[in-house]
Amino acid sequence: MTHIRPVIAKLRGTPVSKNGVFSVVMGRYTDGQYTTVQTSPDIIVPNRLFMKVNLDKSTSSSLIVQMLTCWATPSANSNNASKFYIIENGCPAYDPWDPMSNMVTQNYNSTSGKFSFLSFVWRLAAGAQQRIFVHCEIEVCENSLPNSQCTMKPNCTAGNNTGLNGRRRRSKGSENKHLVSAGPFHMKQKGCDKVALGCSHACAVNSLSKAICTCPVGWALTGDSRTCAETFAGEDNIMQAPRIIYVTEKRAQCIGMLILLLIASVTVIGLVSLKPKKLSISSENCAEG
């Protein structure tokens, strides 16, 4: 039983002399050779997903698959507001964080299209909701027609992946756009060993697939990148020493201040109590005279 549930789109094309119905399937493959279908729905982030859009084998070899736009969503709804574009205007969608994240291996030249992208996790989504559905908007072009331009690829040079001359030409012989989808694929975070890393509290795997030490809320890593220290309100820097030392230093400062205040208070009280006595003695002396 396969876990891959590709959506099969029935495309009505116009071959040379008769109408036909064609089946298009999109599935995930184990590697960049695109020979073995991946039957597991799980993937460890940020491992690469290899996807292939393929026409039915019985389809005429003169039909060309054109992948116009491909994107990922967290649900089966291709119109979900949360989208990650993989292909735009027939070219790899540019990802400023990783320009090599999205790759198109085959497009505009065969009965199949091949592309891949690095897996990721959605922000603000719980673990059970970390799923990816992949959707592609495609056209099937009849290459046997005169001047079909089916294999004329868009200009995908860096910074110019907006199609031919800034706009994508519609190839003569191409049919209406159709949607094909696959998924869900479940994103799994790579595990880490806090003991092996020497972490004082916890660990996690960052976006570069590197295991790092982490701290609970209200705590932060110290200079050794392994030990967590509690942060305090009003402090810009992280205390490098354990909190007990910090509290002892603060307590010593407070005790010193209290002693100074006590001495000052005693001095003031003594001065106030002595002043009336001097005035009283002075009055008695004046009366005797």
Image (cartoon, helix red, strand yellow):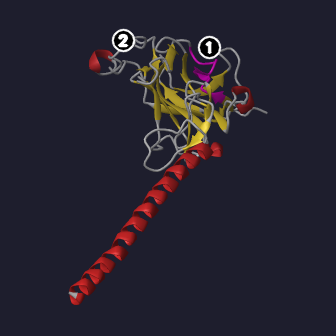
**Above or below: residue 51 compared with residue 179:** above
**Above or below: residue 1 compared with residue 257:** above
**Front residue of 5 and 12:** 5
Amino acid carrying mark 1 in the image: Gly
Q: What span is in magenta?
A: 44-60
Left or right of 238? Residue 225 is right
| Quadrant housing residue 161 | top left
Is residue 255 located in the magenta-colored stretch of the structure? no
Farthest front residue in view:
289
User: Quarter holding the C terminus?
Assistant: bottom left
Left or right of 280? Residue 52 is right
At a point 45% along the width and 11% down the height, the residue shown is 144
Q: Residues within 10 Å of mark 1 (few under 14, many from 20)?
A: some
The numbered dot on residue 32 is: 1
**Front residue of 117 and 204:** 204
**Front residue of 239 and 82:** 239
Left or right of 185? Residue 239 is left
* Rendered location of residue 229, percent (x, y): 58, 40
Residue position marked by numbered label 2 in the rendering: 157
**Above or below: residue 36 compared with residue 240:** above
Name the secondary structure under disc 2. loop
Disc 2 to disc 1: CB gap under 8 Å: no
Residue 75 seen by the camera: no
